[in-house]
Amino acid sequence: MSSRVSIVTVTYNSSRVLPDMLASTPTDTPVILVDNASNDRTALRELADRPNVTLIECPVNIGFGPACNRGAEGVETEFLLFLNPDTRLAPDALDQLIAAADAHPEAVAFNPRFEDDAGHPAFKRSCHLLPRRRWMPKGTPDRDRTLIVLSGAALMVRRSAFEAIGGFDPAIFLFFEDDDLSLRLSRLGSLRLVRAALVTHSGGSGSAPDPRIEAFKSWHFGWSRIYASRKHGRTGAYAKTLVRTIPRCLSPVALLSPEARAERWGYLCGVTAAQFGRPHAGALR
């Protein structure tokens, strides 16, 4: 059944983690790697030199969602699986996801069960684009169920539904793109958790703190949060964010730590840019 799905993975200096992900994918499953102008392209080209892998090299970093859209162009399989490069599929994960899709034709998109490298469960129960009353209970569900939102670390979607909503919002460079996609998909059908499908998600790279990178990530997090909140009718997001963020920007921690200062002021600048209609800042230069 795994030949019914194509995997789309966005890479950015991912050659260290990508071998394990590729090794976990079935050989009959097409894998499209979309590289966002990485510095490790020589290694990436070597990794992509296998029959079922297609490498698309973007000349500049176009952002996560737009790169996903680029990878999905021209795909003809029934399903798309957007998969992070720092994940690993269990041997039967794809078959379990597709079996769940066949059993639930009313559902349009699916998440597997996530664990970290130590085997600890991870579950996305909340979404800042929805009121708290709609958030799911704490803890990890012990059975398959309908979800309010999906994690983009491993998100399988019916290609027809993905195309019907126009894919990922190209205005979002980074962060909240999976929340936005989930809410738009939920207008077409339900979102489901498939516990029998296991994906291991390693998470962060553990690199040393860098103020420029912290500022860049925080700017985009703030921008995308306000942009997506306004898009989905969440009122007062900017005012509530200012109340929380300004004291943090002026705290002793921010004054003494370059990383904390970059993170907090970057976030404040990002939310303000979104509030006043400025487009996203693009890639780190």
Image (cartoon, rainbow, N blue to C red):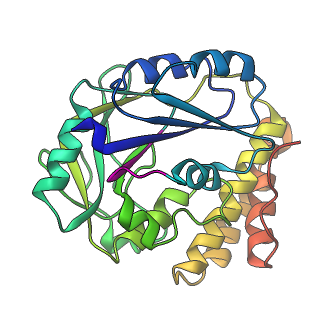
Please name the residue shown 66% across and 55% down the image: 221
274 or 166: nearer the viewer: 166
The percent position of residue 245, horizontal first and vertical second, equals 70, 61
In magenta, the rendered stretch is 75-83
The percent position of residue 130, horizontal first and vertical second, equals 42, 72
The percent position of residue 253, horizontal first and vertical second, equals 76, 41
Left or right: where does residue 261 sit relative to residue 189?
right
Q: Number of numbered discs present?
A: 0
Residue 12 shows in this picture: yes
Q: Is residue 81 magenta?
A: yes
Please name the residue shown 21% across and 38% down the image: 1
Quadrant that contains the C terminus: top right
Left or right: where does residue 285 sit relative to residue 227?
right
Please name the residue shown 60% across and 76% down the image: 237
Please name the residue shown 74% across and 71% down the image: 274
Tell me the quarter of the picture where residue 25 sits: top left
Residue 257 shows in this picture: no
118 or 133: nearer the viewer: 118
Outermost residue toward the right in this view: 285
Q: Is residue 24 magenta?
A: no
205 or 96: nearer the viewer: 96
120 or 101: nearer the viewer: 101
Tell me the quarter of the picture where residue 104 sits: bottom left
The percent position of residue 156, horizontal first and vertical second, equals 35, 50
